[in-house]
Image (cartoon, helix red, strand yellow):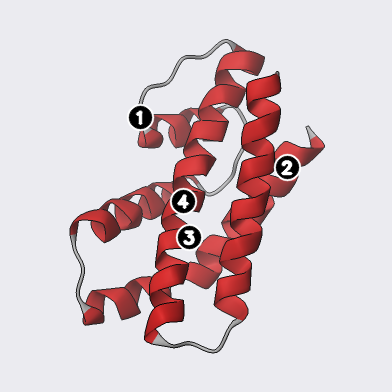
Amino acid sequence: MLKLEEQINQLAKAVSRLGESLALPKTDIVRDSAIQRFEFCLDLSWKTLKTYLEENKGIIVKSPKETFRIAYQQGVIEYDTKWLSLVDLRNETVHTYNEAFAEEVYNQLSPALDLLKTLSSKLNQR
């Protein structure tokens, strides 16, 4: 359980940092920082869920989307389609970057933060 505990703690810190960046007045640097922090959060989210599913349910998953689907089926998370959309958004941020797209992504980060906070809180209470 040590690996899972560490991942849960890392996720909580990353989510908090994303929240900090979104609370700042928006500038290009703040926007770009928030997007990067979102990427970290989403990566930590699926990897933490992956470990949770393996250690607590005996379920082996291999990809982010599979992890979110199975976590949804196991009742660990809600809003399956929103999580899958966040995976797609994260994949796009890694491979595409321009000002218009950055603005579009930034505008989706507050709702994403709400989901991430809920997940982090739920994992901390387990």
SS state under label 2: helix
N-terminal of the pair, mark 1 or mark 4, is: 4
Which quadrant holds the N terminus?
Answer: top right
Closer to viewer: mark 1 or mark 3? 3
**What is the C-alpha distance between the residues marked 4 and 3?**
5 Å
The residue shown at (70%, 21%) is: 2
Asked if residue 110 can be seen in this view, the reply is: yes
Q: Is residue 74 above or below residue 59?
A: below
Marks 4/3 in contact by CB < 8 Å: the verdict is: yes
Q: Which circle marks residue 63 in the picture? A: 1
- The amino acid type found where label 2 is placed reads Lys
Q: Is residue 25 above or below residue 92?
A: below
Marks 1/4 in contact by CB < 8 Å: the verdict is: no
**What is the C-alpha distance between the residues marked 2 and 4?**
19 Å
Q: Which circle marks residue 122 in the picture? A: 2
Q: Which circle marks residue 37 in the picture? A: 3
Find disc 4 in the rendering and name its residue: 40
Marks 1/3 in contact by CB < 8 Å: the verdict is: no
Percent x, y for residue 22? 56, 76
The residue shown at (71%, 38%) is: 123
User: How would you rate the neighbour count of disc 4 (Cα within 10 Å): few for under 14, some for 14-19, many for 20 or more?
Assistant: some
Asked if residue 107 can be seen in this view, the reply is: no
Closer to viewer: mark 2 or mark 4? 4
Observer-nearest of 78 and 112: 112
Q: Residue furthest top?
A: 58
- The amino acid type found where label 3 is placed reads Arg
**What is the C-alpha distance between the residues marked 1 and 4?**
16 Å
Marks 2/1 in contact by CB < 8 Å: the verdict is: no
User: How would you rate the neighbour count of disc 1 (Cα within 10 Å): few for under 14, some for 14-19, many for 20 or more?
Assistant: few
- The amino acid type found where label 1 is placed reads Ser
